[in-house]
Image (cartoon, helix red, strand yellow):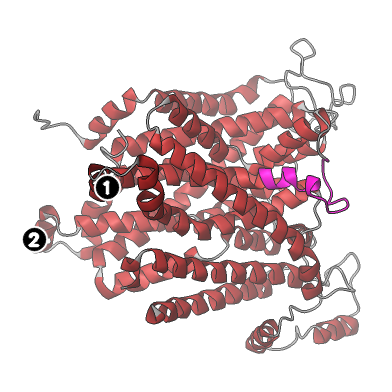
């Protein structure tokens, strides 16, 4: 057994991850996807809601100027797909951050405090777990209007349960390690221990679940937008575009295929990356999957 | 076992109350009422309407009334479909949804368990890798993308199956919806099954069985299958929730007159009583189902009964 002194967990994980070709490919595709979605619309001469009355529902062509074709109102599908991607990715990242903050705080407190508090807190999570959350989000969207900030918060607020459970388990096992005991003996306060010693040591596991939460969140947002309950016109997202495409698929299949492809590829890559990260970072799985 | 049943029962009750309470509070604090229309109603008429729907009472009285009514199976009148009560709508929509969801669930369990076990027995073979790749696709492609693609291929392109509607209620109308709804669950169940089967096959009692000269098929059926199924059983609860959620969008796409369709229509039209009725109905269904899944789990794995 070789000595691995001085190598951080992050570096160890990188070595494992680097060997996972699917995960690395996914990472590269995701970075490209983000870059294209952010930058490319600047170079396209159409805006998201500009209608081109001479070119209604034309099929994709490189020469016609509309690479992905246009929709029933003559709007350029390429620019809509990219702008939709911005929204979908933004919702994915922001809502995941919301769930991250709630989940990590809740889990770390529950796991570190332990005992009665832990039992009550986890009981609450169990109860919330049994609720049909998609329906509650839809309720929220119905009653408070369909604005995008609410989408972030609503989706984030329902997705923290997994995170809380996982973080709690880790916190529980960290609690009795020497460096925590040392901190406690040294008179460090509980909130500070949680912030400075527990949370930083959870980040590896958290990184895995962040990667796996983002696609879930994107899926939830697409689901809502597909039903017409999510992002509203003139804004759009991949879910909304797939919905429009599904209604026109017999005459204009490209309207379904391009957004669906972008959405699927993104979800695919996040899932592969998350799996790869889990193999690399999650000590529980180590060995079992190799 | 009886004590275990009782304890599980006690946790199901508060979950149900929280669900109903949450839905209730959400609806009452929401801006915009069911009587907000194009034109302003005269105040007297609006007051009469509010009185007719008991909206003028204090919240706790409304909640009490709602609970009592639900207990009697009465979800109130629908705001949108004026001539129907929510209970009637549920009664007309639920059989369609139940048929769709039930068949999807059976298909998912059957195919998922078989494919997962198959992949586990040939771990790291080409067959294993292809099952895993297919299931990853199943997880990554949302069912509202799969469904239109299936329609495009089998209904529009090949013309084998109808593109939507319930038609005369025959099986061919429900084949595509069931497949679209089941695909993601097949993927999840297959992955769960593969993982747990691999773990079980590595455990000492299987090695003992092999050492005693039992044949491999016999070991799998008699010894490995039951413990390997445990994670699948505990996934049944979330799977039901996912199938119910998925059925909302599948019914929409295929134009099936199920409960999910009413729900979406209600949500788009701010039909408070209908939306709430469906949430409470489906929520209770999931909670009750989870209760039975817990019992099943307790029966399969005596350790959790402690």
Which subunit holds the residue at mark 2?
Answer: A
Identified at 77% across, 75% down, the residue is B87
Measuring from the top left, give residue B100's x and y in whole percent: 71, 54
* Residue A93 visible (yes or no): no
Image-quadrant location for residue A74: top right
- According to the picture, the residue beneath numbered tag 1 turns out to be B209
Q: Is residue B2 above or below residue A90?
A: below
Q: Secondary structure at mark 2?
A: loop
Q: Nearer the viewer, residue B151 or A56?
A: B151
Measuring from the top left, give residue A266's x and y in whole percent: 55, 32
Q: Is residue A94 left or right of residue A164?
A: right
Identified at 69% across, 64% down, the residue is A143
Q: Is residue B45 left or right of residue B241?
A: right
- The boundaries of the magenta stretch are B162-179
Q: Quadrant of the N terminus of chain B?
A: bottom left
* Residue A167 visible (yes or no): yes
**Gap between marks 1 and 2, in whole Å?**
54 Å
Please tell me how crowded label 2 is: few (under 14), some (14-19), or many (20+) other residues with Cα within 10 Å. Answer: few
Q: Nearer the viewer, residue B123 or B239?
A: B123
Q: Is residue A76 magenta?
A: no
Query: Do tags 1 and 2 sit on the same chain?
Result: no
Q: Is residue B128 left or right of residue B64?
A: left
Measuring from the top left, give residue B204's x and y in whole percent: 23, 48
Q: Is residue B129 above or below residue A195?
A: above
Q: Quadrant of the C terminus of chain B?
A: bottom left
Q: Is residue B169 magenta?
A: yes
Q: Residue furthest top?
A: A63
- According to the picture, the residue beneath numbered tag 2 turns out to be A186
Identified at 84% across, 49% down, the residue is B165
Q: Nearer the viewer, mark 1 or mark 2?
A: 1
Q: Nearer the viewer, residue B136 or B302?
A: B302
């Amino acid at each position: 057994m070789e000595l691995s002194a001085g190598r951080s967990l992050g570096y160890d994980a990188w070595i494992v991850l680097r060997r996972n070709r699917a995960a690395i490919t996914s990472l590269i595709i995701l970075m490209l996807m983000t870059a294209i979605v952010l930058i490319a619309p600047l170079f396209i001469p159409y805006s998201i809601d500009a209608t081109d009355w001479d070119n209604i529902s034309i099929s994709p062509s490189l020469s016609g100027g509309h690479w992905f074709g246009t929709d029933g109102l003559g709007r350029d599908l390429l620019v809509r797909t990219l702008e939709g991607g911005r929204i979908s990715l933004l919702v994915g990242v922001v809502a995941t951050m919301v769930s991250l903050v709630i989940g990590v705080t809740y889990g770390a407190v529950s796991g570190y405090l332990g005992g009665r508090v832990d039992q009550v807190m986890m009981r609450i999570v169990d109860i919330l777990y049994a609720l049909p959350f998609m329906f509650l989000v839809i309720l929220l969207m119905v009653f408070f209007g369909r604005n995008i900030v609410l989408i972030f918060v609503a989706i984030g607020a329902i997705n923290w349960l997994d995170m809380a459970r996982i973080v709690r388990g880790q916190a529980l096992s960290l609690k009795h390690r020497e460096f925590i005991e040392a901190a406690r003996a040294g008179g460090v306060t509980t909130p500070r221990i949680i912030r400075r010693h527990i949370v930083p040591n959870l980040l590896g596991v958290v990184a895995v679940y962040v990667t796996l939460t983002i696609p879930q969140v994107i899926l939830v947002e697409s689901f809502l937008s597909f039903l017409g309950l999510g992002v509203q016109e003139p804004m759009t997202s991949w879910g909304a575009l797939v919905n429009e495409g599904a209604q026109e698929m017999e005459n204009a299949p490209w309207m379904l295929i391009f957004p669906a492809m972008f959405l699927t590829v993104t979800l695919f890559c996040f899932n592969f990356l998350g799996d790869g990260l889990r193999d690399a970072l999650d000590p529980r799985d180590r060995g079992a999957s190799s | 076992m009886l004590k275990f049943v009782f304890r599980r029962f006690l946790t199901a009750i508060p979950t149900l109350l929280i669900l109903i309470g949450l839905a209730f509070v959400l609806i009452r604090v929401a801006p915009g009422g069911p009587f907000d229309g194009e034109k302003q109603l005269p105040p007297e008429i609006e007051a009469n309407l509010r009185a007719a729907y008991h909206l003028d009472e204090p919240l706790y009285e409304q909640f009490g009334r709602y609970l009592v009514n639900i207990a009697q199976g009465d979800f109130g009148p629908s705001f949108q479909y004026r001539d129907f009560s929510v209970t009637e709508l549920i009664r007309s929509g639920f059989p369609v949804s139940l048929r769709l969801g039930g068949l999807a669930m059976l298909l998912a369990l059957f195919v998922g368990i078989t494919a997962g076990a198959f992949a586990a027995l040939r771990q790291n073979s080409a067959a294993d890798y292809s099952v895993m790749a297919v299931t990853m696709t199943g997880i990554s492609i949302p069912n509202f993308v799969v469904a239109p693609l299936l329609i495009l291929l089998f209904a529009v392109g090949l013309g084998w199956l109808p593109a939507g509607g319930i038609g005369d209620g025959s099986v061919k109308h429900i084949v595509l919806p069931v497949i679209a709804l089941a695909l993601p669950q097949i993927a999840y169940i297959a992955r769960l099954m593969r993982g747990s089967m691999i773990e079980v096959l590595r455990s000492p009692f299987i090695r003992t069985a092999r050492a005693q000269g039992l044949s491999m098929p016999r070991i799998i059926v008699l010894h490995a299958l039951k413990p390997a199924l445990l994670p699948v059983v505990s996934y049944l609860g979330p799977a039901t929730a996912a199938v119910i959620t998925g059925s909302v969008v599948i019914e929409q796409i295929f134009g099936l007159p199920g409960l999910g369709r009413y729900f979406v229509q209600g949500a788009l039209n701010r039909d408070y009583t209908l939306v709430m009725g469906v949430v409470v109905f489906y929520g209770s269904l999931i909670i009750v189902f989870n209760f039975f899944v817990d019992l099943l789990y307790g029966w399969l794995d005596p350790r959790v009964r402690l």
